Amino acid sequence: MIRHVLLDLDGVVVDFVSQALVVHKQPDLIDRWPPGVWDMHTLLGITKRDFWSPIDQIPGFWEQLQPYPWKDDLIATIEEVAPFTVATSPSRNPACPTQKVAWMRRHIRESFHDFLIGRQKWLMARPDTVLIDDCDANIEAFRKHGGKAITFPQPWNANHAHTADRIGYVREALTELRG
């Protein structure tokens, strides 16, 4: 039984990666992403600090990100199964959480308030809760602590082979987890 779904934002609902690559003047890298490689700063050949510094300098960066075209289909698929809460990690920029809330209220629902902002998503792991995330490490930690999880297919994770039908993959995984 699934009582609740935790839904990651960046890389699942929000296209953080493309905009980060634009900031670093390598927008075409998304088309030749090495399968399963997570760390964008490593792929770009720079330090984490050099990766995040220019992003943190852009006013409104997080609020201006674009939703993926499958956002509405993904949310509808989840809502057929259970209520959801957004579980998103902030950057070190103190404006990031506020901007993410503004993004959710513009792109999900104006009155949207079902969100949690923090890095340790595994703290919310329960046998009847499913995390949908694009980060393999978040998925592993969530499962380790008793939750169920679905790795949202993206080029940078273990499910990179399933990007042709992301929503179909999630729908099938939710059906399996429901039992």
Image: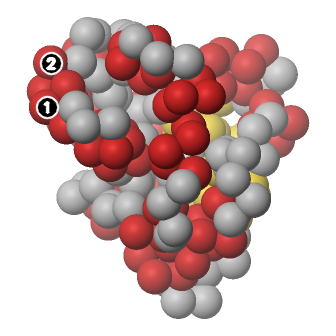
Taking 12 as reference, is 72 left or right?
left
Relative height, residue 5 to residue 123 (above, below): below
Please count the marks in the image. 2
> Which residue appears at 15% of the width and 18% of the height?
32
Verify CB contact (< 8 Å) between mark 2 and mark 1: yes
Residue 77 in sight in this render: no
Q: Callout 2, which amino acid? A: Arg
Q: Quadrant of the C terminus?
A: top right
Above or below, comparing residue 110 to residue 163 in the picture = below
Q: Residue at x 22, y 58 (%)?
A: 69
Q: Which residue is mark 1?
A: 28
Structural crowding at the residue carrying mark 1, measured as other residues with C-alpha within 10 Å and reported as few (<14), some (14–19) or many (≥20): few
For image coordinates 49% across by 45% down, the residue present is 54
* Most foreground residue, 17 or 174: 17
Q: In x, y percent, where is residue 143?
A: 71, 20
Q: Which residue is mark 2?
A: 32
Q: Position of residue 79 (x, y in %)?
A: 48, 63
Q: x%, y% of residue 106?
A: 46, 82
Q: Is 74 left or right of 28, judged from the image as shown?
A: right
